[in-house]
């Protein structure tokens, strides 16, 4: 009889423990999903603003090229247009990835989706870094737009040569930076650069969901 009573008590205790684990898991899941959505909502707003800004810049560049037929303006406008397009497409695709996140899927699949978002955000940043050697295009258009001055035609040869050398020197630097910008970047300034470009919001959301997966793993018998 005592063994039967002990078994009943143990079974009841196990059932209560399982019920408590399931309740805690559900509460953690709901809380962390809410926090993840909030973090990604901020990123969603930011990316929407970026798409809008890139769209406005593209329209302005088209009008600029139409109004200025000189080769230096056409080439500079096309260069800036290329990187503007890269930025716009990168932001649009990230918007699509965020909108497509399905929180009803298993946690492991959700983490895979979050990882894709993180990788794509980083890849967009890496491609924009490659615009550094073309900074002279920004200067040419900037002088024309803001003070209506043709800096290219009126600059002396020494100044043009110096800027050409600087553009060439920036090529290996931008390639190096491109190669160093990785998810597991070690240097603090690289981490900060990634975080400031939207990686901070993605990391927060990713960690919230990862915490759910860790709790579920530790609580072995918890249902999905």
Image (spheres, rainbow, N blue to C red):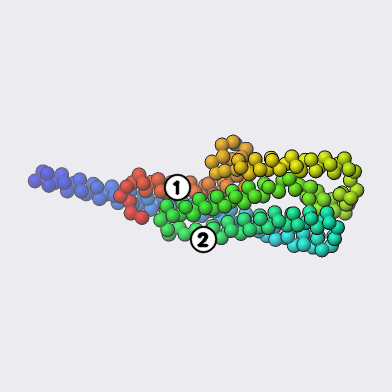
The disc label shown at residue 124, or none:
none
Q: With 217 as the anchor, is 125 left or right in this view?
A: right
Location of the C terminus by quadrant is: bottom left
Q: Residue at x 73, y 57 (%)?
A: 81
Q: Residue at x 20, y 45 (%)?
A: 10
Query: What is the spatial separation of the Cα atoms under label 1 and label 2, in whole angstroms?
Result: 18 Å
State the image quarter where residue 90 is shown: bottom right
Q: Residues within 10 Å of mark 1 (few under 14, many from 20)?
A: some
Please give the residue where the numbered disc 1 appears in the rendered image. 210
**Residue 197 coordinates in the image, percent (x, y):** 62, 48
Foreground of the two, 17 or 206: 206
Q: Earlier in the sequence, mark 1 or mark 2?
A: 2
Q: With 12 as the anchor, is 191 left or right in this view?
A: right
**Residue 194 coordinates in the image, percent (x, y):** 60, 44
Q: Residue at x 75, y 42 (%)?
A: 168
**Residue 84 coordinates in the image, percent (x, y):** 70, 56
Q: With 14 as the anchor, is 134 left or right in this view?
A: right
The answer to whether 66 is drawn above or below residue 13 in the figure is below
Label 2 element class:
helix
Please give the residue where the numbered disc 2 appears in the rendered image. 100
Foreground of the two, 29 or 148: 148
| Residues at discs 1 and 2 in contact (Cβ within 8 Å) | no
Label 1 element class:
helix
Q: Is residue 145 visible?
A: no
Q: Residue at x 71, y 43 (%)?
A: 171
Q: Is residue 52 visible?
A: yes
How many numbered tags mark residues here?
A: 2
The answer to whether 58 is drawn above or below residue 190 in the figure is below
């Amino acid at each position: 009889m005592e063994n039967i009573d002990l078994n009943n008590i143990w079974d009841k205790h196990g059932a209560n423990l399982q019920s408590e684990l399931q309740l805690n898991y559900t509460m953690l899941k709901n809380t962390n999903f809410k926090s993840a959505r909030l973090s990604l909502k901020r990123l969603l707003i930011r990316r929407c603003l970026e798409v809008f800004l890139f769209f406005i810049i593209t329209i302005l560049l088209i009008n600029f090229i139409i109004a200025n037929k000189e080769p230096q303006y056409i080439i500079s406008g096309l260069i800036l247009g290329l990187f503007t397009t890269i930025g716009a497409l990168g932001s649009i695709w990230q918007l699509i990835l965020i909108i497509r996140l399905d929180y009803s899927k298993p946690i492991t699949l959700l983490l895979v989706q979050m990882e894709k978002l993180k990788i794509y955000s980083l890849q967009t940043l890496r491609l924009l870094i490659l615009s550094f050697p073309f900074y002279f295009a920004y200067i040419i258009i900037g002088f024309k737009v803001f003070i209506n001055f043709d800096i290219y035609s009126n600059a002396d040869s020494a100044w043009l040569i110096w800027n050409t050398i600087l553009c060439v020197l920036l090529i290996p630097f931008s390639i190096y930076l491109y190669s160093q910008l990785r998810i597991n970047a070690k240097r603090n300034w690289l981490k900060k650069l990634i975080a400031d470009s939207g990686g901070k919001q993605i990391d927060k959301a990713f960690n919230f969901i990862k915490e759910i997966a860790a709790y579920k793993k530790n609580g072995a018998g918890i249902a999905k």
